[in-house]
Amino acid sequence: MTLLLLVRRSLRQHLLSTIITACSIALAGGLLMSVWVVKAQSQATFTQVNTGFDAVLGARGSKLQLVLNAIFHLEASPGNVAVSDYEFIQRHPAVKLAIPIAVGDNLRGYRIVGTVPELFSAVDYAPGKKFTLASGRVFTPGAKEAVLGEFAAHRLGLRVGDTFHPFHGLIYDEKNQHAETYAVTGILAASNTPADKVIWIPLHGLQTMSGHDARASTDVSAVLIQLRSPAAGFMLDMMYNKQGNRLTFAYPIGAIMAELFSKIGWFDQVLALIAYLVGLVSAGGVLVAIYNSMAARRRDIAILRALGAKRRTLFGAIVLEAAAIGALGMAAAFVAYAAILTGVAIVIRAQTGVLLETWKFHPVMLWAPLGMIALCALGGLLPAWKAYRTDVADNLAPVS
Amino acid sequence: MPLLALSSLQKSFRTPEGGRRKIVDVDDFSLDAGQQLALRGESGSGKTTFLHLIAGILAADSGSIRIDGREVATLSESQRDRLRAEAIGYIFQTFNLLQGYTCLENVSLGMAFGAGIDRARAAHLLERVGLSHRLHHYPRQLSTGQQQRVAVARALANVPKLVLADEPTGNLDHRNARESLALIRDTCRENGAALLLVSHDPEVLGAFEDQRDFAALNRAAGEVAT
């Protein structure tokens, strides 16, 4: 109780430096936790998001580019797949389901993807979860109709019954407007997958859009594949990637994305290192803040000693005060963390359609505060030692 | 058996020139339980060092200090802290109140390191010194006389057997000094504490039946710089 009183009063007596130091710890702690959670959650999310498919078949090229283009709707398409190749894989006994997609147009930066209605009826985009419509209905093949992902609809301000003109290319250029008019027939409920930021239209519509190469009017950009067994994936991998040289079979999707994260692992490490350093500097700030106030505290320390306080009591009070500053800072760090994560989640959602779970528990939320408090307590050791060594008689002036 | 008994007590400090200067050299001194004694001494005569030795704030070079039968000189620093917390009250010339703490907290801290905080007793003591309406005021919000009264209440908080008062009225005007001195003596009497007061003020010393000349007591007095 006495220790707590000493700590509480000391924090209040040095309120400004307490607040400034706690704020720097809050920023450091928030940054540290954010880096970890973004790293862990994006890795977990992007390696698990496959929107219900095991593999992607596309033009010869990079598997990663193929996955990014067909699953995450990022990147450009590496090329086209002939309709015969699509029909072949669709009929292959190892394949349970094959959904063709065609890309190449956008609406104010949001991708327009041609596909078949089975995507919405036959595919579980996550275990036990099918795409559902928040409003309207799925487009009719052959009609100039569109179903919008929830995020795209919200950002574009489109509702069921609205119409729009597609724009040519994956990057929005107002000069490249197509003549066709599409009507919105449905808005998907949020799935927190890349599908949320896509405008889905019938495959044939995209293939035959005015201005597109008529010779490729039956080609598709990629085929999304569900396999009957993992062994089938390795068999098709052998067939397309090792024995063939026209197409690329990207399988398994999670491993390909994991490879991407391992390639950019150095970036995570740099971020983590920066976060560690910021944390260290903040803990150093605690040391400096308390140490610099020691001259002003010496008299109080001497008085407390004269009242019978033991050296180790005052040593403990200073260490506890440093830890308390750390604890206050780390409590505020969760606010900084929420702010940083919210910003990052908005950007990731806008870019990929994937929503990070900001408040999902991650061990860093436990070890970062504990570590930071311990580090701050460590930073309090030097001023505590100074307090320990404070000479009572010398600081109880005047002497008569 | 006296409450406080000193014999052959010596304390010296290192000088900037590298030598040692003896500050306290008291052959024999005692104070009975409940006794109130004033020591007369000029500034720089070593009175504060003498009180610090008794309180265990400083360790003696040699000699014996017995308080209530316990030998202070052989106690470790931690044990001296404990003894001070449990048995000694100290009133300083400059009051030495903790500025970041309220009156109630200042008095509470007077007992915190001994038997533990008893807020009711702290409040009662402040009421006794006439500050029941200032419990939650900070020292800077009080007059000098009021601050001294808080210091008196704090010195008595741990129910000490011995109260040491170092020029307790040195910073007060005549009226406040008179009142404060009466308060110290009365409250010590009420609490059964012996009082050892040092002062150079004839008016303060005149209030005591028992008084001694510190210069005569301290053989090192002549060597101490003023």
Image (spheres, coloured by chain):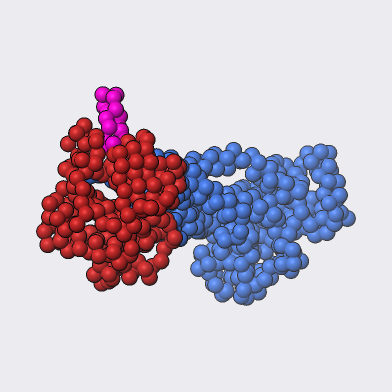
* Image quarter hosting the C terminus of chain B: top left
Task: Please tell me whether the stretch drawn in magenta is mainly helix, strand or loop.
Answer: strand
Q: Give the magenta-colored segment's residue range.
A: B11-25
x and y percentages locating residue A257 in the rendered image? 68, 47
Residue A279 painted magenta: no
Give the camera-side residue of A180 and B216: B216
Does residue A203 appear anywhere in the picture?
no
Q: Is residue A328 left or right of residue B189?
A: right
Colour of chain B in the image: red
Does residue A44 appear anywhere in the picture?
yes
Q: Is residue B161 left or right of residue B173?
A: right
x and y percentages locating residue B82 in the rendered image? 43, 51
Q: Is residue A325 left or right of residue A68?
A: left
Colour of chain A in the image: blue
Task: Place residue A397 in its image quadrant.
Answer: top left
Q: Is residue A212 left or right of residue B136?
A: right
x and y percentages locating residue A399 in the rendered image? 23, 43
Residue drawn where x is 62% and y is 70% of the image:
A189
Q: Is residue B48 above or below residue B209?
A: above
- Looking at the image, which residue sits at the far right? A93
How many discs appear?
0
Residue drawn where x is 71% and y is 62% of the image:
A125
Q: Is residue A302 above or below residue A331?
A: above
Give the camera-side residue of A132 and B101: B101
Q: Is residue B165 above or below residue B226?
A: below
Q: Is residue B129 above or below residue A344?
A: below
Residue drawn where x is 14% and y is 55% of the image:
B206
Residue drawn where x is 65% and y is 54% of the image:
A45
Residue B13 painted magenta: yes
x and y percentages locating residue A352 in the rendered image? 59, 55
Give the camera-side residue of B226 and A297: B226
